[in-house]
Image (spheres, grey):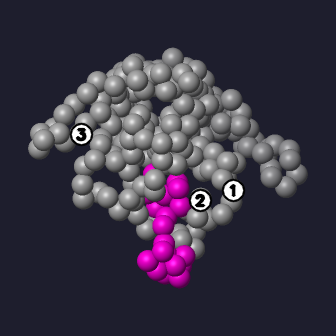
Amino acid sequence: MKLPYADHHVLRVLYRICIEISNDAPLSIRSGRTAYGTVDNPVVRVHGKPYIPGSSLKGALRSEAERYVRTVYGEDPRYVCNILDPNIELERKKSEGNNYIPCYVCRIFGGPTVASHIFFEDAYSKSYSIETRRRVSINRITGSQHAGRLFDVEYVAPGAIFETEMEIKNIDIIGEDSEEAKILRYVLKSFFNGYVKLGSMKSVGLGSIKAKLKKATRITIDKGKLKEEDVTSQLENILRS
């Protein structure tokens, strides 16, 4: 069964998943500006508190989906396109006409030709501590340090707690066996089992997180009325399988 990817005008099924995130290692999601004294690229804040942007969470899961699809299905653009060059996908749509179907990853996470079926709220901190680490700038040509170039990196110390919510629209991760559902189940397993990292400097020990499933609700329309089911235990079984 192929997902009718342009199905945002109807509600077949909606999953609302509440998530708690903690970091096992320092977490650095940078704001892209210097705003706190001598700190180079401080962590993102809202009302003075660190948070994890929903775009960072979605981007990390999309990257995991792309790795999985390339490994299992191959490099064909029908399976995974180059999201960094959207013109390629737009040209494919133009050349294939009515036979065009977006790649697997775009059908789930959205892309240049289709809207997303996945939505992430920003993850706001319940408890946190912010620390800094002094680092040395490296000359990319010589491989040695730049003399006198020290800078402070800000990060959220291990043990912080964040809460967020994600929604999955019209992909039945529990009740269907489509390729999109299979890919998404793998991505969620990776996320909830600690295989997805967040933020910058992941290659030097930062970004390890743990995601905990707090509650999962499955929403459908039954006889013209919204029907809500608690499917937390069913989703937990899938994540453990």
Label at residue 74: 1
User: In front: 136, or 104?
Assistant: 104
Tell which residue pokes out farthest to the right in this image: 142
Residue at 65%, 38% in the rendered image: 201
Callout 2 secondary element: loop
User: In front: 90, or 239?
Assistant: 239
Residue at 42%, 26% in the rendered image: 235
Tell which residue pokes out farthest to the left in this image: 224
Residue 47 point in image, percent of width and height: 31, 34
Residue type for callout 3 = Thr
Residue 20 at least partly seen: no
Where is mark 2, residue-wise? 79
The secondary structure that dominates the magenta segment is helix
Where is mark 3, residue-wise? 220
Which quadrant of the view contains residue 127? Answer: top left
In the figure, 26 relative to 135: above or below? above
Q: Are the residues at dot 3 and dot 2 in contact (C-beta closer than 8 Å)?
A: no
